[in-house]
Amino acid sequence: MMQDMNSANQVDGSLQSEPKPKKRKIITVVIFFIVLSVILYVGIDETMQWWQEKQMWVKAGFASDKFPFRMFTERELVEKGLWSGESQELNAIITTVRPEETYAKFRQALIDEDLDVATKCFTKEQQEAWRKSLYEIKDKGFLQGMIDDLPEKLEDSIQRDLNNTSIESYAYVLNNDPQESVRILEFSKSWEGEWKINNIH
């Protein structure tokens, strides 16, 4: 009789203890899914913010439109015309061809009517536009007048350190202008250290 009672108590005890591990498992699973949901939510939110920021830079032209949408380097931005050119990397390039040399080559090319050589004296961004302009000037018979307006030498009264900058302007007076109108020649330094004409105005 005592054995039966003991057996009954043991069975009773085992039945009572069974639900506890199940409850723990359920709680563990619930906690796991809550944590996973939080991680996924945060991850998706961060990804969306990253995506939106990258697309903003892509639209502005400062980042590649191909995944992972890397930001362009300073050099690439200068070449794309999205940077003023006054950058530390570009400024630090040692000058190989001074503005005076480029100007002399440009003026001589106009005298020789070699407009292809004259065009190459401009920055890459300006070459196509100036090629058209120079050929139009020649076709209209104004090329000699342009040459006459340009001084023989580009003189600069200011001492400039061309190795610590990448943009320079030179003022000159038109040779054939009785009122001595001042014109401006703008130069930009290339990645090869060559000073090129950026504009004449």
Image (cartoon, rainbow, N blue to C red):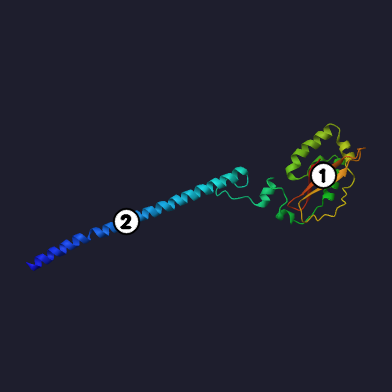
The spot of residue 50 in percent (x, y) is 53, 49
The spot of residue 153 in percent (x, y) is 89, 47
Nearer the observer, disc 1 or disc 2?
2
Q: Amino acid at mark 1?
A: Leu
Q: Can you tell which quarter of the image residue 92 is in?
A: bottom right
The spot of residue 154 in percent (x, y) is 87, 48
Q: Residue at label 2?
A: 27
Residue at figure coordinates x 86%, y 38% from the top left:
146
Q: Is residue 10 visible?
A: yes
The spot of residue 2 in percent (x, y) is 8, 68
**How dense is the environment of label 2, judged by Cα within 10 Å: few (below 14), some, or many (20 and up)?**
few
Q: Is residue 108 visible?
A: no
Residue at figure coordinates x 48%, y 49% from the top left:
45
Q: Residue at label 1?
A: 185
Q: Are marks 1 and 2 in contact (CB under 8 Å)?
A: no
Residue at figure coordinates x 83%, y 34% from the top left:
137
**Helix, strand, or loop for circle 2?**
helix
| Residue reaching furthest to the bottom | 2
* Nearer to us in this view, 113 or 137: 137
* Nearer to us in this view, 147 or 155: 155
Which corner quadrant holds the N terminus?
bottom left
